[in-house]
Amino acid sequence: MIHLENVSKKYHNGTEALKNISLDIAPGEFVFVVGPSGAGKSTFLKLLIREEKASSGNITVNGRDLINIKKRKIPYLRRTMGIVFQDFRLIDKMSVYENVAFAMRAIGAEEKLIKKRVEAVLKLVGLEGTEHRKPNELSGGEQQRVSLARALVNEPEILIADEPTGNIDPELSLEVMKMLVAINRRGTTVIVVTHEHELVKIFGGRVIKISDGEITLDEFNPTKYNPEKSTASSEAEDKKENEEK
């Protein structure tokens, strides 16, 4: 689904954001991308959505060659993806319903289908009954859920979440992550860029670390997260396990 081979990105100012990285992400994977500020994480995401073009190497996403792709084909590539931003990027003048529906209207979907899909994704993220509210009437966590619903409404093959918990409190961060896990379990490939290592410890999965433009870690961490258990009970079990050791 995602293939990078010997990919480098050097900006016009001479900054080498990525240096000869190679990796594959299979359909249905859940991947954390971590690393310090300025490590190259944002550039990595920009290459995947073809907001930036690699300086060298090969990139294939959903069967599309991103090095040689024509500009007019880029919107079609992005239709196979959903993107959740740290700053939500909601349209203040629009209601919750209109913010989510906007993504479908942009591709010319019929109103009947839009209504059905918007209602379904708002239910999925726990926002039934908020359709007519404006973003400024919602909490930060609710706004992030609207952003998530908008990213999901076109049923993307890949969901990319760029620091999705950066502007919400820890408790809400867990709720957003639980939703991302649930979405992944429905078959969507999920890539989460985050600096919150505690979330990585809780949810596990594949972890790719980028440092100074290079991949310095790529490993799978067994998840301790169980959707049937609370975080508190999981922590209690961990404590008991450590005491027994």
Image (cartoon, helix red, strand yellow):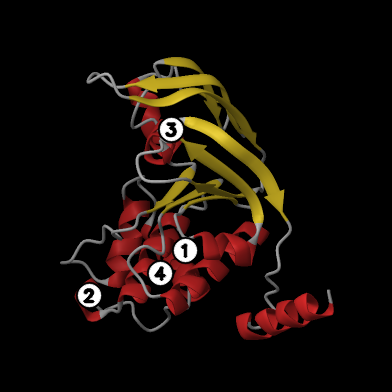
Residue 163 in view of the camera: yes
Disc 4 marks which residue? 145
Q: Which residue is mark 1?
A: 117
What residue type is disc 3 on? Asp
Q: CA distance from mark 4 to mark 3?
A: 32 Å
Q: Residues within 10 Å of mark 4 (few under 14, many from 20)?
A: many
How far apart are the alpha carbons under marks 3 and 2? 40 Å
Question: Which of 36/126 is in front?
Answer: 36
Residue 186 visible in image: no
Which numbered disc, 2 or 4, marks the residue that appears first in the sequence?
2
Q: CA distance from mark 2 to mark 4?
A: 13 Å
Q: Which residue is mark 3?
A: 212
Q: How far apart are the alpha carbons under marks 1 and 4?
A: 15 Å
Q: Position of residue 77 (x, y in %)?
A: 45, 34
Q: Position of residue 211 (x, y in %)?
A: 47, 37
Residue at 37% of width from left, 67% of height from top?
A: 144
**64 on left or right of 195:** right
What residue is disc 2 on?
134
Q: Closer to us: mark 4 or mark 3?
A: 3
Name the quadrant containing residue 218.
top right
Q: Earlier in the sequence, mark 1 or mark 4?
A: 1
Provide the secondary structure element on which disc 3 rests: loop
Cβ–Cβ below 8 Å for labels 3 and 2? no
**Front: mark 3 or 2:** 3
Q: Amino acid at mark 4?
A: Arg
